[in-house]
Image (cartoon, rainbow, N blue to C red):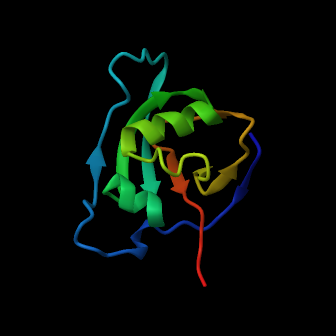
Amino acid sequence: MQCSAVELNPNTNTSSDFRPFEIRRVDQNMEIEHGVTVKVLFFAKSKELAGTRESTIQLPSKINYKKLVNILAKNYNLETIKNNILIAKNEQVCEEEIDIEISDRDSIAVIPPISGG
């Protein structure tokens, strides 16, 4: 897996609109072989759309990057930004064309496009 280090801090927005922690499951129709439970961290716009800064989800232990993005988009209301987000596993930004191996208690970060002025 090709990933590079990035510093992540999901506590950058302290708005009272956000739930501090929530547990979700992938679509019940999706069969998960060798499933693992991971923490999902949301930042900026992804945190706003998901309505939480942190969640837990069950995923397959090996998953394609694009499939992971689609699962996260569907489960956390990220459809409007899914084509522009980055995914990081354990603070390592992942390349889009890879299969990601995931273990129990790994963290997956959803990093939206950054803008400013």
77 to the left or right of 6: left
Drawn side of residue 19 relative to residue 83, left or right: left
Asked whether residue 43 appears in the rendered view, the answer is no
- The location of residue 29, given as percent across then percent down, is 36, 15
When asked about the image quadrant of residue 37, the answer is top left
Front residue of 40 and 86: 86
90 sits left or right of 56 in the view: right
> What residue is at 50 percent from the left and 49 percent from the top?
107
Q: Nearer the viewer, residue 76 or 106?
A: 76
Residue at 44% from the left image edge and 66% from the top image edge = 10
Coordinates of residue 83 in the picture (x, y in percent): 60, 46
- 108 or 42, which lies in front? 42
User: Residue visible at 54% across and 46% down?
Assistant: 82
Is residue 113 among what the camera can see? yes
Residue 1 location, x and y as percent? Answer: 74, 39
Which of the 4 image quadrants contains residue 13?
bottom left
Quadrant (top left, top right, bottom left, bottom right) of the C terminus: bottom right
Query: In the image, is 67 to the left or to the right of 31?
Result: right
Q: Residue furthest bottom?
A: 117
- Dividing the picture into quadrants, the one containing residue 47 is bottom left
Residue 61 x %, y %? 54, 27
